[in-house]
Amino acid sequence: MCGIVAYLGKKAAQPILIEGLKRLEYRGYDSAGLALLGSGAVKIKKASGRISALEEILDPPDAAETFGIGHTRWATHGEPNTINAHPHLDYTGKIAVVHNGIIENYATLKTWLRNEGADFASETDTEVIAGLIGYFYTKASQDEVQLNGQNKFEWAVQRALRELHGTYGLAIICSDFPDILIGAKKGSPLILGVGEDEYILASDAAAIVEHTTQAVYLADNEMVTVTPEGFHTKTINNIIITKDLQQIEFSLEQIELGSFQHHMLKEIFEQPKALSTCMGGRIDRQDNRIKLGGIASYLRELTHTKRLILTACGTAFHAGLVGEFLFEQLARITTETEYASEFRYRNPIIEEGTVVIAISQSGETLDTFAAVEEAKERGATVLGIVNVVGSSIARATDVGIYLHVGPEIGVASTKAFTAQVAVLTMLAIELGRRKHISSAEANKYIDELSKIPDKISKILQQSDHIKEIASANINRDNWLFLGRGFNYPVALEGALKLKEISYIHAEGLPAAEMKHGPIALINDGMPAVFIATAGPQYEKIMGNISEVKARGGKIIVVATEGDENIKEHADHLIAIPDAPELLQPMLTVVPLQLLAYHAAVLRNLDVDKPRNLAKSVTVE
């Protein structure tokens, strides 16, 4: 959950590293640092806080320093201060390391290294990596190094990596080798951008696209050694491998703010276009068919499966819950949604023919990746629904569907959620058409699905109205979000969004469950957000609204346009276009995204970088 960037080329490295760190700051923003190599020694600058704090202590860029590594941190081991900030030096002062991930056996290694005479300045697990490389570097036998056809630096890195238990994305430099950069990956993303006479190693393509669109994606237990003359890749066991250059799918323009104040607001407003792109080429209006090319060869197996397990974390989990309802209603397939963080720590039942669907925006979520590995080990076919091309989950799954919504920079996911629901909807319609629902019914849903982007555009026009609702209620510290049926997962997602970025405590519930305990929380003026759209449970949720109103709750309602009955029950009303109940989550979530966004802005909070959170959770 940290951002790594390294540069080796002909330009001054410092400005490129700072620019790269700013593009990666959504991955972590507790502290930041640089290590530059240009005068025979490693020069390190680091600071706690945001990258702006690091910039304040930097010297003017030196044109001779064309090689360096940088890091922006989300703290795991050790509090977020300057000492614990990366890069970390080994005890010889020659090796510098930046790291994303967690080393599980760092305490044992640290004790052993101390007994060997090593000193440590920080509380981090990363400094142990540097110390271990430094130890093997000083102990390297020239005969052993030459026998493996390596230089001393590369040999020491490989030898150290084989002792590490856990996850890592690493960029490593050594003052004795001022023209060699080494990167290594296990469980944390790492990409090498290949430009004209320059190389950029980063944990995310966002730090690369300004310089090149050609990249090499490292797989687990692989490393890359970069020099001004080129690069080569191999396993950490020194087996040479060939990696193809791939095209980065998004552009610099897509990660810029443009006219928007925050990335989150930009991404909320991008949803109509993002969904059109996601569904483009997959909805064949001429033949009224869903065409999911990424899984075409597996559709027969999916059609005949008796059980689906959807696994994900956070917002993606809520999308999975919608998917559960979709698969059971349209395809009549028994479906369960599991938290990926729990899936691998119990003894899940994976019967013959079980298909597991893993959902992750980044494709790097460690808990979800681990659930994929567990499911594969138990014999399940695993399908991935991810946004980032070439990500770890995309490579690990048997087959998959990309979201194709472009980069999502805001920590609080928005457009990825609606796209995940859209993909699950398309898959459920196609499976349903093959085994349960009529072609006419499938055609109706396909027609309605194609209208969703325009309906979202209409909802977005109410942003100022939703801001007024947020302003009237942001002084309340506890909120309820309540929905039924397909809108119950949306209630969960609305509560999560408010918690994530406005730091207001919120609870999402099935509306009928409120009276089984949580109704005790309601007091005078407590905001209760109801999703009360047209559908089979409309009358039931109207009863739930009356229960809350009778106890003094402030009623905020997301309702269907033209519903005159709801007006007398609502203190605040947000009207959305009509849609079939199973497609409503892609609409009803949008007002809740805007409500959370405006609440956070009105409370003067950093919307794109909420405290204690980072975009891609690549640690446990």
Image: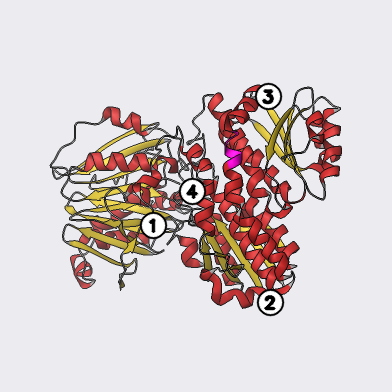
- Magenta residue check for 53: no
The residues bearing labels 1 and 3 have C-alpha atoms spaced at a distance of: 43 Å
Please give left or right for residue 410 compared with residue 65 in the image.
right
Quadrant assignment, res 336: bottom right
Find the magenta span and give its range.
458-462
Residue flagged by tag 1: what amino acid is it?
Glu
* The disc label shown at residue 616, or none: 4
Q: Which of marks 4 and 2 is in front?
A: 2
Mark 1 or mark 3, earlier in chain: 1
Q: Earlier in the sequence, mark 4 or mark 2?
A: 2
Query: Badge 3, how many Cα within 10 Å: few under 14, some, many 20+?
Result: few
The residue where tag 1 is placed is: 249
Q: Kindly indicate whether the residue at mark 4 contacts the one at mark 3 (C-beta within 8 angstroms).
A: no
The vertical placement of 509 against 220, above or below, is above
Residue 476 disc label: 3
Q: In which quarter of the image is residue 467?
A: top right
Specify few, some or many for label 4: CA neighbours under 10 Å numbering under 14, 14-19, or 20 or more: many
> Earlier along the polypeptide chain: callout 1 or callout 2?
1
